[in-house]
Every structure is written in structure tokens, then in C-alpha cells.
Amino acid sequence: MAPQYAPSLRSRMPPLLLFLQTGFIVIFFCKVDMEQYLEIKQQVFRNHYSEFQDVNGMVILGFGFLGTFLVRSSFSAIGFNLLVAAMAVQWAVILNGLESLYYRGKIWINMRSLVVAEMCTASSLIAIGAVFGRTNPVHLLLIALMEVSGFVLNGWLLQTFLQVRFLNSIMLLHIFGAFFGLMLSWVLSRKGSEQYHEKEKIDRKTGLFSIMVLVELDHPDRGRKLMAVYSTYLSLAVSAVTAAGFSVLTSPQGKLNLFHIQRCTLAGGVAIGVAMSAAHPPWVAMVTGFAAALISTLGSRFIKPMLRFAFECHDTCGVLGVHGLPGILGWMVHLLLQITNSDDLTTAGRFALFHICALLITLCLSMVLGLITGILLKWNFWKPLQDKKCFDDQAFWEFPHLAVVK
């Protein structure tokens, strides 16, 4: 008979947290310093600070509250998101500063480096969404460290060997995180993964609570250019309307699905974010939002169940439909617009080749690292969750009002 309570993490989680945090403090003490902003850099600081506020809000609040739709996992969604983000952003600062450490002898922190670290952290949170509820906090920390390492490596490969612009490489975070998480979910599948867990359901209160996060996620960064602001809002508006329409069309009862409204609306922002540097006309942003919401809705309704039944790949938060497929759509839109606007056929062909190679490298590297991470986490040393304790806050959080008084 299985034990009544989930395995205690006292011998795993505190040592890992203290070891990692102590190591980061030592590294920051020895090799990291902060840039001192002069008067001439004040405007640059203000621009990046507004962008940092938006990205940090998206990472801490957006992704945290996005997972509160599950009936009995709201504490875990918010608390573990904060824990993982706080650890991953430190690791991302170190990894992104290795080049500076090599050439300048120190890792220099400025507002831009923090923004980049937050974006790398967002990629790891996307991957965690695929396995959320079926992993413990130790698993989540290891996933974040591995995913951030892989994403930074992917950006370095693309910028070094394919001359991909930094902005384009960092916006691949949606694709990298989604397919890393899907491969990880496939490796961690267990008997019965093809079925929905009894606690994996949406409650009225938690569903309304999670959809409020659209206020935090559905806005462009204030640090962006006006063209990006216009494109983002138009894409989000069209994707919201399209998601509602196709949610009703694909429903057997002809009713709206809250999961579609919440997730598929975000798909328009994901797609236009990836295609941003090339999407200038308003109609392009609107068509991109329409196509992203269509793909996301159909993916949530048909592809997600197919992955679960055919491949036993349990995608808890639907990252394939929200981030993976819309991200690839945005990447393809970017490619088509660049080819259309190019006057030289040779230049267009060369760009298309490099563009497709960048996507293939990202997909391959993300899935390979997801496979390796999944094999690592299969080790019983990390005390995996029992089936009956999945999607349940009581496995990790204190609830004094539920305690049994003897």
C-alpha cells in the first residue's frame, strides 16, 4: 500500500537551495560587479528600467498566476514560480556574462543584462508549464538550471555561427521552452499519463483568478518602439476575438471554453513578438494574431489530446498551443516578410537558409536537452511524486486549518 503522505523533501530541497545560493554568492563576490551609470547614461537607464519592470512583472506575476487555473495547485503555481524565477535569473546573469568575464575579467551587471536574464528565465518557466503538477520543487529547480543553460547556449550558437541578430535569437524563447518541456514531459510520462488526473480540472474561482493575468501579460513593453506597441495590441485584439469564435465552433456543446480564451489570446502576442522586427503594416499584425489564435485553439482542442493518447506526452499548461506553434508561426512570418521586402534574390535565399537553420538548431537542441534532463529526473533519488499526490498543494505546503489534532 502506498504511503499516505508525499515523500519529504527535507533531505533534498534545503541542501540543494543552500548549495546553489551559496555558490552564486561566491561567484558574484569574486567575479561580478555593477556598472556605475554616468549622467550621459541616465536616459538609457530609464529606457531599460521601464522594460525591466514589464518583463519582471510578466515573469513573477504573469507566469505565476497563469498556472492557478488548477483546483488544488494555486499555491504551487505562485510559490514555485517565484522560487524558480529567483534562482534562474541569477544563473542566467552568470551564463550571459561569461563572454564579458573572458574579455574584461569581470561580469558587469546593468539594466539590459537583467532584462536578458529575465527573458532566459521566462523560457524555463514555459518549459516547466508542460510538467507542472507532476514534479516536485527539486525537479523544477533542476529543470530551470538545465533549460537556461541550453537557451543561453542556443543563443550563442545562433549569433556566432549563423550571424542571427540578438533580438531574433532571444525571441526564440517560446519555441525553445515549449519543445524542451514537451520532450521532458514525454520522458517523465508514467503509467496512466494518457488519462486526465482526477485533480487536473478547472474550478470557477481559480479559473477567474488565472484569467486576470491577461492584464499583466497582454501588454507590450513600455520600452519598445511605438510600432511594436501598435502591432502587439492589434495582434492581441484579433487573437482574443478569433479565440472566442473558434472556441465555440470546436465545442461539441457550442459553448465558450475559458482555457481557450485565456491561453489562445496570448498566442497572438507570442507570434507577433517573434515576428516583431519585420511586421510593420497593421494588417500583418492582425493576420498574424488571427492565425495564431486559430492554431492555438485547434491545438488545444485536438493536438493536445492526441499527444496525450498517442505519445503519452502530458502537456499540463498547453505550452505547445500557446508558445510552441505560435512561435514557429511568428518565425515563418518573419521569414516571409524579409524575403518579400528583399530586392536581391541571392540575399533573400541566403537569409532564408540561415533562418531555417536557426529554427532547426533551436528545435534539435531544445529536444535533446529536454531528453537529457528527463533522464536525469527519472532518478528516484529526487523522490518523484506519487500519482495520487500530483496536482495537489498539500504535498508541499502547510495548511494549518486542515491539520489533524490528536
Image: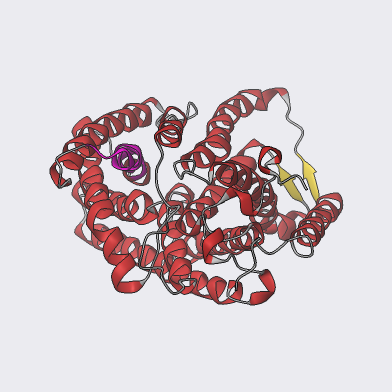
Instruction: Determine if residue 405 is in view.
Output: yes
Q: Position of residue 254 (x, y in %)?
A: 14, 40
Q: Is residue 220 visible?
A: no
Where does residue 352 sit, x and y in percent of width and height? 27, 61
Q: Percent from the top left, x then y, of residue 232?
A: 34, 32
Query: Which residue occupies 75% across, 54% down?
Result: 104
Left/right placement of residue 366 relative to residue 296 reads right
Q: Is residue 257 magenta?
A: yes
**Image height check: is 43 above or below 109?**
above
Q: Main secondary structure of the magenta part?
A: helix
Q: Which residue is found at the position 19% from the left and 49% from the top?
A: 340
Is residue 271 rendered to the left or right of residue 185?
Answer: left
Total marks placed: 0
Foreground residue among 9 and 292:
9
Q: Is residue 349 above or below residue 244?
A: below
Where are the magenta residues, as a range?
A: 256-270
Q: Quadrant of the N terminus?
A: bottom right
Q: Quadrant of residue 95?
A: bottom right
Q: Is residue 353 magenta?
A: no
Q: Is residue 292 left or right of residue 169?
A: left
Color scheme of the displayed model: secondary structure
For residue 1, above or below residue 78: below
Q: Position of residue 393 (x, y in %)?
A: 59, 48
Instruction: Farthest residue to the front: give it.
Output: 406
The one nearer the camera, 250 or 37, is 250
